[in-house]
Image (tube, rainbow, N blue to C red):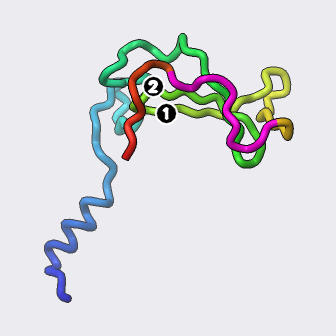
Amino acid sequence: MLIPAGLLLTTVAGCAAPPQNPDPNGTGAPLIARATDSAIVNRDTLNDKIPAIAVTPDGCQNWILDDGAEGYAVERFDPVAGTVVCTNRLPPGAVIGNPYTNRFPDILP
C-alpha cells in the first residue's frame, strides 16, 4: 500500500512537537503539567485530605489519594532517614486506609 508523501510528513510532523500551552510564569517553557488539582466536579483542594498507604509489588509504600476523576500516588519516605519506607509485614497490593476523597465514583475506561 502506498501512502502519499504529504500525508506521511503531516502525520510525522504532528507527532514531533509537544503541545504549546501558554506559560503562566512567563519563562517561555511549554506548560505540560500543573502542581494543583483541577477536577471538574470536586473543586476542594486535596491538601486537607488524608491519604491511604498502598504497598507496591516490591514491598515499598506509597501515599495514595483518588478523587474519582484522577488518582495520585507518591512514594512514602522516612522523615528522618529520607529513604523510601519498605516492609515485609504487609503483602504487595495491600491498602491501609481509604484512598477515596469523596463520593464521586471512579471513571473506568
Q: Which region shows up in magenta? A: 90-100
The residue identified by callout 1 is 71
x 50%, y 28%: residue: 66
Q: Is residue 44 left or right of residue 77?
A: left
For the N terminus, which image quadrant? bottom left
From what the image shows, is residue 64 above or below residue 30? above
On whether residue 52 falls in the magenta region, the answer is no
Q: Is residue 92 above or below residue 64?
A: below
Q: Secondary structure at mark 2?
A: loop
Q: Residues within 10 Å of mark 1 (few under 14, many from 20)?
A: few
Query: Residue at position x 28%, y 32% from top?
Result: 22
- How many marks the image carries: the answer is 2
Q: Residues within 10 Å of mark 2 (few under 14, many from 20)?
A: many
Kindly indicate the quadrant of the structure image that contains residue 48: top right
Q: Is residue 65 left or right of residue 14?
A: right
- What is the three-letter code of the residue carrying label 1? Gly
Q: Main secondary structure of the magenta part?
A: loop
Distance from disc 1 to disc 2, alpha carbons, whole Å, reads 6 Å
Is label 1 in contact with label 2 (beta carbons under 8 Å)? yes
Q: Which residue is mark 2?
A: 67
Query: What kind of residue is marked 2?
Result: Asp
Q: Position of residue 89 (x, y in %)?
A: 85, 36
Determine the secondary structure under disc 1. strand
Residue 76: where, in percent of width, then height?
A: 71, 30
- Asked where in the image residue 82 lies, by quadrant, the reply is top right
Residue that appears at 42% across and 29% down: 68
Residue 86 falls in which quadrant of the image? top right
Q: Residue at x 42, y 33 (%)?
A: 106
